[in-house]
Image: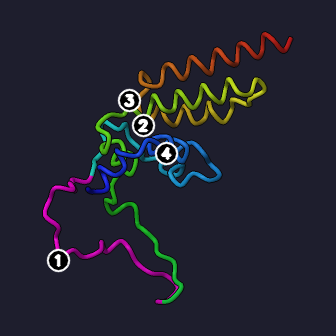
């Protein structure tokens, strides 16, 4: 029972990942989505580690991890340029398909839009544009239509 099977076995993991990706205040993964060098998931490099591989007992931490401000109480910094990998691509690879993530975002978006008719869509439009850069325009088309329909509906009913 490795990490991959544990994450796949939990029913809330994909929802938690999408929430973290799209919440700019509390989302740990939001910065991952905003990266300027982000690529479509199909083009991303994923670490080849597999839980079925024999563990490497001679493992050493990457030299890109270093302590600042002394040995105790220091801050650990990860240098992302040294090939740390694409976190979002790694998470998607655990499930084998980006569609699971796209569908979860679509359901969460629908819940937000239906729950609040005065919902400010600017943040969702921004998130959608970032998600399209990673998941592809075609994959996010339904979400784009939902937001456009919602904006049209609210404009029409506010007159």
The image shows residue 82, relative to residue 119, as above or below, that is below
Secondary structure mainly formed by the magenta segment: loop
Image marks 4 and 2: residues in contact by CB distance under 8 Å: yes
The label number, if any, that marks residue 74 in the structure image: none
Give how far across and how far down residue 77 sits, in percent: 46, 71
The quarter holding residue 67 reads bottom left
Helix, strand or loop at mark 2: helix
How many residues crowd around disc 4 within 10 Å: few (fewer than 14), some, or many (20 or more)?
many
Residue at mark 1: 58
Give how far across and how far down residue 12 sits, in percent: 47, 43
The label number, if any, that marks residue 134 in the structure image: 2
The image shows residue 152, relative to residue 77, as above or below, that is above
The quarter holding residue 55 reads bottom left
- Let me know if residue 59 is in the magenta part: yes
The tag earlier along the polypeptide, 4 or 2, is 4
The image shows residue 119, relative to residue 17, as above or below, that is above
Q: Nearer the viewer, mark 4 or mark 3?
A: 3
Helix, strand or loop at mark 3: helix
The tag earlier along the polypeptide, 1 or 4, is 4
Residue at mark 4: 33
Helix, strand or loop at mark 1: loop
Q: Nearer the viewer, mark 2 or mark 3?
A: 3
How many residues crowd around disc 3 within 10 Å: few (fewer than 14), some, or many (20 or more)?
some
Give the spatial CA distance, label 3 vs label 1.
Answer: 37 Å
Give how far across and how far down residue 108 sits, in percent: 57, 32
């Amino acid at each position: 029972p490795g990490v991959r099977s544990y994450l796949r076995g939990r029913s809330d993991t994909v929802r938690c990942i999408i929430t973290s990706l799209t919440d700019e205040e509390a989302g740990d993964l939001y910065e991952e989505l905003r990266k300027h060098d982000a690529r479509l998931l199909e083009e991303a490099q994923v670490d080849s580690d597999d839980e079925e591989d024999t563990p490497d007992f001679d493992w050493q931490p990457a030299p890109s991890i270093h302590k600042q401000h002394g040995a105790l109480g220091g801050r650990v910094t990860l240098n992302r340029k040294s090939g740390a990998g694409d976190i979002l691509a790694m998470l998607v690879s655990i499930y084998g398909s980006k569609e699971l993530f796209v569908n979860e975002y679509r359901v969460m978006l629908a819940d937000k839009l239906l729950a609040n008719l005065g919902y400010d869509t600017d943040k969702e439009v921004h998130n959608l544009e970032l998600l399209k850069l990673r998941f592809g325009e075609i994959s996010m088309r339904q979400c784009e239509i939902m937001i456009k329909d919602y904006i049209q509906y609210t404009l029409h009913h506010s007159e």
